[in-house]
Image (tube, helix red, strand yellow):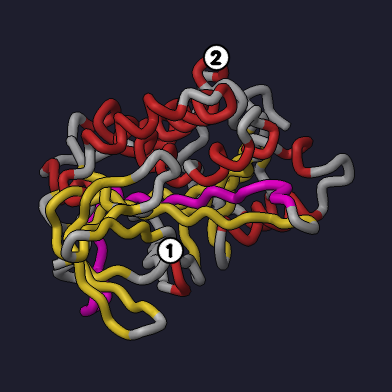
């Protein structure tokens, strides 16, 4: 391992200069990035991170904060089996191993992990580039109704408890030849800003803000996370949505999120909670 904590599996790396091969500001990263594994191309950074959890001889907490980053993914994915388009040189594709089960309120910290990550990424993008972004429940970042970034949290479960969570995120940095179904729905930092963006700077800021919000979760500072998410999510109140229920298709108007991160929707005189599922936004 190099002094900056960057582990480079040589068989997996390009001979070209590594885009993240700069010293990491260790003092800003807190619990995160004790090890950072950089790959040129992988199927999925989440899969690599999950294999580290499964193979940790001293248990998941021994790999808490380990980061996997790739220049490209051949099988990147989002929620509910959706593909995450991950071409080389165009995005930031990262997975972080976290163990929110060590928090005093482990159940709530785990439930709010994706919400906290969304806040952290939005804060990081604004710090690194000056571009404000909106959050859309449960795990997306948008600019002008186009998707800029997404989050995928996958739990490692042992018995009835969650050992660790692999938190993956993808951020579109530069323009790319998006597939037809994405061309009108996706955007990138460089497209929005009209100038080049340094991936390393965005990478560092995302880790730094994730470290802060992860500490908030472990310390039980949930109100600050929720308040920050609500401020950045105009669609959380007053937007019309549709989703599938056991009884068929339902529609409602969003009414915020509750203190556990569930989406609240108003159907007539009633407020319902949505904790998962495929949602179509109008």
Residue depicted at x 78% and y 56%: 158
Disc 2 to disc 1, how far (Cα)? 36 Å
Q: Position of residue 127 (x, y in %)?
A: 28, 26
In-front residue for pair 143/265:
265
* Quarter residue 156 falls in: bottom right
Q: Is residue 251 left or right of residue 24?
A: left
Assess whether mark 1 and mark 2 are in contact (beta carbons under 8 angstroms).
no
Choose mark 2 or mark 1, whichever is in front: 1
What label does residue 276 carry, if any? 1
Residue depicted at x 65% and y 57%: 48
Residue 178 is one of the magenta-drawn residues: yes
Residue 175 can be seen in this image: yes
Q: Position of residue 197 (x, y in %)?
A: 26, 39
Q: Earlier in the sequence, mark 2 or mark 1?
A: 2
Residue 251, relative to residue 152: is it above or below?
A: below
Which corner quadrant holds the N terminus?
Answer: top right
Q: Position of residue 138 (x, y in %)?
A: 36, 54
Residue 182 can be seen in this image: no
Magenta residues (range): 161-181
In-front residue for pair 38/58:
58
Helix, strand, or loop for circle 2? helix
In-front residue for pair 280/74:
280
Residue 222 is one of the magenta-drawn residues: no
In-front residue for pair 183/149:
149
Which corner quadrant holds the C terminus?
Answer: bottom left
Helix, strand, or loop for circle 1? loop
- Which residue of the protein is positioned furthest toward the right in this rendering? 57
**Mark 2 = which residue?**
27
Graded by Cα atoms within 10 Å as few (under 14), some (14 to 19) or many (20 or more), the crowding at tag 2 reads: few
Q: Position of residue 254 (x, y in %)?
A: 21, 55
Residue depicted at x 47% and y 67%: 77
């Amino acid at each position: 391992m190099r002094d900056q904590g960057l582990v480079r599996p040589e068989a997996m790396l390009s001979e070209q200069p590594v885009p993240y091969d700069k010293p990491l500001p260790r003092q800003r990263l807190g619990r995160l990035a004790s090890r950072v594994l950089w790959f040129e191309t992988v199927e999925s950074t989440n899969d690599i991170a999950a294999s580290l959890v499964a193979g940790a001889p001293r248990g998941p907490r021994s790999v808490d904060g380990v980061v996997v980053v790739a220049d490209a993914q051949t099988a990147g994915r989002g929620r509910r089996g959706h593909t995450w388009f991950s071409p080389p040189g165009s995005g930031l594709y990262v997975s972080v191993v976290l163990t929110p089960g060590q928090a005093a309120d482990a159940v709530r910290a785990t439930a709010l992990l994706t919400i906290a990550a969304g806040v952290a990424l939005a804060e990081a993008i604004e710090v690194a580039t000056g571009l404000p972004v909106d959050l859309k429940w449960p795990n997306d970042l948008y600019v002008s109704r186009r998707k800029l970034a997404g989050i995928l949290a996958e739990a490692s479960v042992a018995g009835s408890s969650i050992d660790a969570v692999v938190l993956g995120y993808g951020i579109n940095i530069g323009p790319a030849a998006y597939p037809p179904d994405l061309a009108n729905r996706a955007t990138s930092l460089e497209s929005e800003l009209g100038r080049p963006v340094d991936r390393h700077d965005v990478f560092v800021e995302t880790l730094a803000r994730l470290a802060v919000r992860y500490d908030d979760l472990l310390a039980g500072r949930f109100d600050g996370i929720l308040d920050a998410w609500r401020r950045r999510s105009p669609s959380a109140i007053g937007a019309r949505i549709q989703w599938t229920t056991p009884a068929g298709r339902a529609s409602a108007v969003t009414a915020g999120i509750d203190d556990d991160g569930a989406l609240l929707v108003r159907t007539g005189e009633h407020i319902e909670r949505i904790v998962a599922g495929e949602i179509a936004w109008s």
